[in-house]
Amino acid sequence: NGPQTTRTLLRLSRGGADATHLREFDLLTNTFVSPEDPTLRGFVLPEAKTSASYRSRDVLSVGSDFGEGSLTSSGYPRVIKNWVRGTDIADAKVVFEGEVTDVSVSAYVADQRHRGGPIYDV
């Protein structure tokens, strides 16, 4: 009932570290979604202390190390961007900025439609 989930985001870490390499994975083909394929344009981010959540099939809310000023004093994401599939993460729109003194910031969508509920932006 409702749309079938066919993709997920995998966070791959070395030895259980907080920093992860993010890759999009296709649950139907059991393969990583290629970022180089112009018809697929999979989401991939290098190793960092990253948080990411689908806003839609083609948009992620992402917190990561985007360069100077993008991390908290704890080394976690301070800036959240909405990243559109097929675009450069550097061009993604900033939608939230926490304080440098915050431990971390993140954003996600909680879809409760399968329980008869609404969709929440958190």
Image (tube, rainbow, N blue to C red):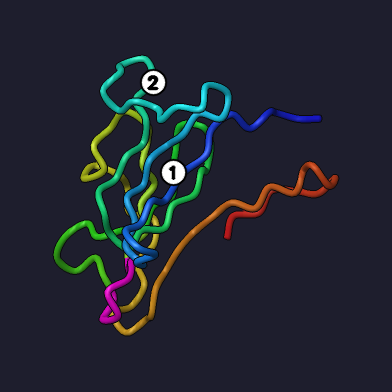
Q: Which residue is mark 2?
A: 40
Nearest to the observer: residue 89 or residue 18: 18
Residue at disc 1, secondary structure: strand
Task: Classify mark 2: residues with Cα within 10 Å, few (<14), some (14-19) or many (20+).
Answer: few
Q: The magenta stretch spans which residues?
A: 72-78
Is 102 left, or right, of 87 in this rendering? Answer: right
Q: Find residue 39 and report its horizontal and vertical position in percent.
A: 37, 15
Q: Residue furthest right?
A: 116
Residue at 49% x, 49% y is: 53
Name the residue type under label 2. Answer: Leu
Q: Which mark is residue 14?
A: none
Residue at disc 2, secondary structure: loop
Q: Residue furthest left?
A: 68
Q: Is residue 109 above or below residue 32?
A: below
Magenta span includes 74:
yes
Residue at 63% x, 32% y is: 5
Name the residue type under label 1. Answer: Leu
Q: Find residue 31 and report its horizontal and vertical position in percent.
A: 45, 27
Give the spatial CA distance, label 1 vs label 2.
Answer: 15 Å
Q: Residue furthest bottom?
A: 101
Is 79 left, or right, of 4 in this rendering? Answer: left
Q: Which mark is residue 60?
A: 1
Residue at 54% x, 55% y is: 108
